[in-house]
């Protein structure tokens, strides 16, 4: 296995009485793609939010390359695209560079255009989110995360709010990223994508990782009854 770049060590998180993460440990090697599946409420989004430093775990550590990650080092893409509605696609991608990185407008524009081209939206840079399809909006959101040059990209059900015919264009962008060596953690029930792109698949249930295996093994011979039952539901 390659050197671990991202490591979650015994993460615990509770909301009041509810223990949502009950000791989650796993690591992601450089350039690996881990796909997380599991039932609603099992803690998948909470786990990603802890990895993205949007949520403070009650116990346990998140380490990136052996240190606490800086926020810009972890990019996150959400189920709902979370774009600024009053800004064009280009402005949405530029804003992190100008307001956080303090780049000049010119420099930010150049980098943002490059990323928008990479996600196939060169001709949509001046559109506002409401003038874009869901798939296009999600690709803007991916460009906006990528432009900050994160070391790891997290995706929380990036295609589950999309009409079926738009799912593919977003998955294609993600597959391209994986091919280019991006380290990724993806919560998704797109099992064909998972089979094709994942280095390994993690099954999460009730705040713990029940099992982790390479896709071939995970789908053909899941070790746990819980995984088998869940796969039967989503397939
Ligand atoms: N901010 C919060 N305050 C209180 N409870 C929360 C909060 N966020 C999540 N929870 C609870 O934690 C549990 C896990 O939520 P989480 O969103 O991580 O699940 P999930 O696996 O992503 O589910 P889904 O597949 O539906 O997205 C749920 O019971 C949820 O209600
Ligand atoms: Mg979720």
Image (tube, rainbow, N blue to C red):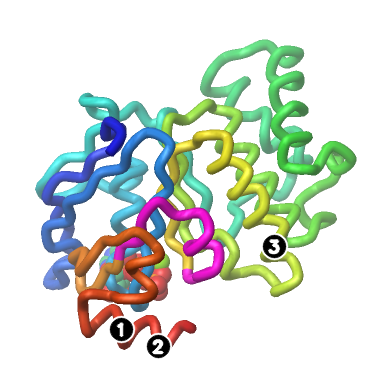
Q: Residue at x 56, y 38 (%)?
A: 145
Q: Quadrant of ligand 1?
A: bottom left
Does the magenta segment cover residue 78?
Answer: no
* Circles 3 and 2: CB atoms closer than 8 Å: no
Span colored in magenta: 189-202
Observer able to see residue 45: no
Q: Is residue 112 left or right of residue 35?
A: right
Q: Is residue 66 left or right of residue 17?
A: right
Total marks shown come to 3
Q: Is residue 63 left or right of residue 234?
A: left
Q: Is residue 214 left or right of residue 133?
A: left
Q: Residue furthest right?
A: 123
Is residue 59 positioned above or below 75 on the image? below
Is residue 138 positioned above or below 205 on the image? above
Query: How far, Cα to Cα, is label 3 from label 1?
Result: 26 Å
Quarter-of-image position of residue 162: bottom right
Location of the N terminus (image quadrant): top left
Q: Residue at x 12, y 57 (%)?
A: 23
Which x, y percent locates residue 135? 72, 59
Instruction: Please tell me whether mark 1 sits on a helix, a strand or a loop.
Output: helix
Instruction: Please tell me whether mark 3 sits on a helix, a strand or a loop.
Output: helix
Badge 3 is on which residue?
Answer: 168
Badge 2 is on which residue?
Answer: 232
The first of marks 3 and 1 along the sequence is 3
Query: How far, Cα to Cα, is label 1 from label 2?
Result: 6 Å
Badge 1 is on which residue?
Answer: 228
For this rendering, which residue is in front, 31 or 95? Answer: 31
């Amino acid at each position: 296995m390659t050197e671990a770049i991202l490591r979650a060590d015994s993460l615990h998180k509770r909301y009041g009485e509810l223990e949502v993460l009950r000791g989650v440990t796993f690591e992601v090697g450089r350039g690996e793609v881990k796909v997380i599946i599991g039932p609603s409420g099992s803690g998948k989004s909470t786990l990603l939010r802890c990895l993205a430093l949007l949520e403070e775990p009650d116990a346990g550590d998140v380490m990136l390359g052996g240190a606490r990650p800086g926020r810009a080092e972890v990019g996150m893409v959400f189920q709902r695209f979370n774009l600024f509605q009053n800004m064009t696609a280009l402005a949405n991608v530029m804003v992190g560079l100008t307001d956080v990185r303090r780049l000049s407008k010119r420099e930010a524009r150049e980098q943002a255009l490059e990323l928008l081209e990479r996600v196939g939206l060169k001709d949509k840079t001046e559109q506002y989110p409401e003038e874009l399809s869901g798939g296009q909006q999600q690709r803007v959101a991916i460009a906006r995360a990528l432009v900050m040059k994160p070391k790891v990209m997290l995706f929380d059900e990036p295609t589950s709010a999309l009409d079926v015919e738009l799912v593919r264009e977003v998955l294609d962008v993600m597959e391209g990223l994986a091919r280019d060596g991006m380290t990724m953690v993806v919560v998704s029930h797109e099992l064909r994508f998972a089979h094709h792109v994942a280095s390994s698949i993690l099954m999460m249930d009730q705040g713990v990782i029940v099992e982790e295996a390479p896709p071939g093994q995970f789908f053909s011979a899941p070790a746990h009854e819980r995984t088998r039952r869940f796969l039967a539901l989503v397939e």
